[in-house]
Image: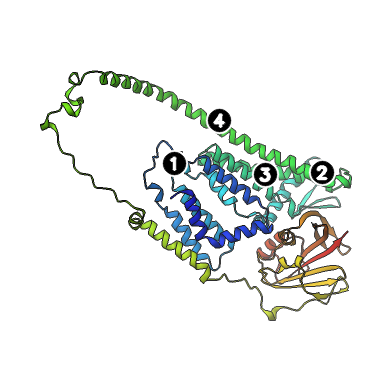
Amino acid sequence: MSIPGLLALCFCVFWPVSIWYVERILDKSDEPLGVLSLIAFVAVVLSRRGQFSKSTKPTKHSHYKIPLSSIFCLLAYIATWPFAPKLLSAIFAVLAIGSLIDSHGGKFKMDVGSWLLLLFSLPIVSSLNFYSGYPLRLLVGKIAAPLISMVGFPTVADGTTLVWSEHLVQIDAPCSGIKMLWFALFIGAVLSSVLELNFFRAAMVLGASVLGALLGNVLRITSLFFVEAEILKVDPSIDQFVHQAVGTVAFAISAGLTVLVAMRFSRKGADEETPELEETQPAAEETLEAEKTLEAKVNLPDFALPASERSGETQTANDKRPEKAQKAPVKGLKKMILNDRRMLVFLALSAIAIATPAIFTRGSDRSISTHDFPGWPKEYNGRILQQVSPEKADEAFYQEFPGKIQCFAQGERRIIIRWVAKPTRQLHPSSDCFRGLGYDITYKPLETDAEGIRRSCFRAGKDGKSFAVKERIYDDAGGNWTDISTWYWAALLGKTHGPWWSIVEISPTP
């Protein structure tokens, strides 16, 4: 089966994943980096098309062999479909596809870099921010604080906040370094695939990518600390430029480390292959001599050759022996499939996988009961709240939300209040909701009001319209969080207990 045939089959079998993937790419709720990784993966596969390793020679029907790993992934996809998150189903799907491609053998063999490119083709940046954003910011803060202290500014990391004297510098969600880590691993995966590094060398390159991304983000946070703490005075008009320039330099250092390690291992591999070539040179010379001898024998008359090397025409009739008739090979795709048990199992599971989404609908995570809900507040910040119908810009907040949600108005300002009783991935950051509607997001520094309550801030713009958005999550015990990832980990570790309120303030700006 050809690569286009495999892809066509997989699109049919995993049709819900295909639809979900296209929707996620088009709605812009996640960074569209997966498309870049998918293009790189396809380029790697096409660059190796028609090539096979010296030790593997394809047979006529060898490409129809279905690997067991694809069958197991297909089983996992079917078994977990009714309750698994869509991203998990997509991971099972791409693992099955990768196993099918890998079954071609030879140069189609999937290496570590190719597997990573295939997995990175999924829209995972938003999920990485949700689950890994807070731990990464904690780690970066713990490393940056002593570095800043070493240059004469005694600093302590309090969670994701760097404390120096009376200055508090928050390491907010955009500074988690997730995108830098993604790009560093992407570069490492591409280099590992292009240079065809073995497992150990590819693992070393990817490890260098992770280390480089971490050190690059530490460098960025440490440098911007002096700006945010006003140790270095920067004109507000170029503040955004300074942040971007520092981030670019930090990423260049991270990517440079990955490239250096990859090229080092590539040269090392080339040096190890040189002695092997030198050892094979005498064997090649012997082969050349044998060919010359054979050519000389060909020019001799048939009677001058030894009896064992004479042609069939000079042999006596008594020396000829009838050859045993060979059994004709089984022909036809239909008979081949019927004689291949793995193929039968795979096709049967494929049919089940196609029908499963239509038969079993995914259960929604309903984390609350109606009687647990205390009701909506009547006032917010001392002003009356008026319930209104959600506008188009608010619809993304309502999608698959497992708790209670309501839109309110205070003059021109809209306030979206969400209520949940347990930690859930469906409490999306408001920036993802606006990005999904096509808005351009510009992050702003955290805001602290007169009562000491902190909120995350960003500006959303589209078609000449602009909104200032503020967000926070809090509980009834006085806990307050400025981003979803921090709240989720605090709830997961038992540092806070539900229910929780999420407040998103949306104000039009000129």
Are the two marked residues, 4 and 3, in contact with CB atoms closer than 8 angstroms?
A: no
Would you place residue 452 above or below residue 1 in this image?
below
Q: CA distance from mark 2 to mark 3?
A: 19 Å
The mark that comes first in sequence, 4 or 3, is: 3
Residue 267's label in the rendered image is 4
| Marks 2/4: CA–CA distance | 37 Å
Task: Say whether residue 172 is left or right of residue 292.
Answer: right
Asked if residue 356 can be seen in this view, the reply is: yes
Instruction: Please state which amino acid type lies under the numbered disc 3.
Output: Ala
Q: Amino acid at mark 2?
A: Val
The mark nearer the N terminus, 1 or 3, is: 1
- Residue under circle 2? 242
Q: Is residue 250 above or below residue 167?
A: above
Going by the image, does 235 lie left or right of 497?
right
- The residue that mark 1 highlights is 106
Instruction: Give how far apart the Cα atoms at labels 1 and 3 are.
Output: 33 Å
- What's under tag 4, amino acid-wise? Arg
- Helix or strand or loop: what does disc 3 sit on? helix
Amino acid beneath label 1: Gly
Residue at x-position 43% and y-position 50%: 1
Residue visible at 55% across and 68% down in the picture: 83
Mark nearest the camera among 2 and 3 is 2
| Image position, residue 135 (x, y; %) | 68, 54
**Colour treatment of the image:** rainbow
Hey, which quadrant is residue 494 in on the image?
A: bottom right
The residues tagged by marks 4 and 3 sit, at their Cα atoms, a distance apart of 23 Å
Disc 4 and disc 1 in contact, CB within 8 angstroms: no
How far is disc 1 from disc 2 in space, using C-alphas?
A: 49 Å
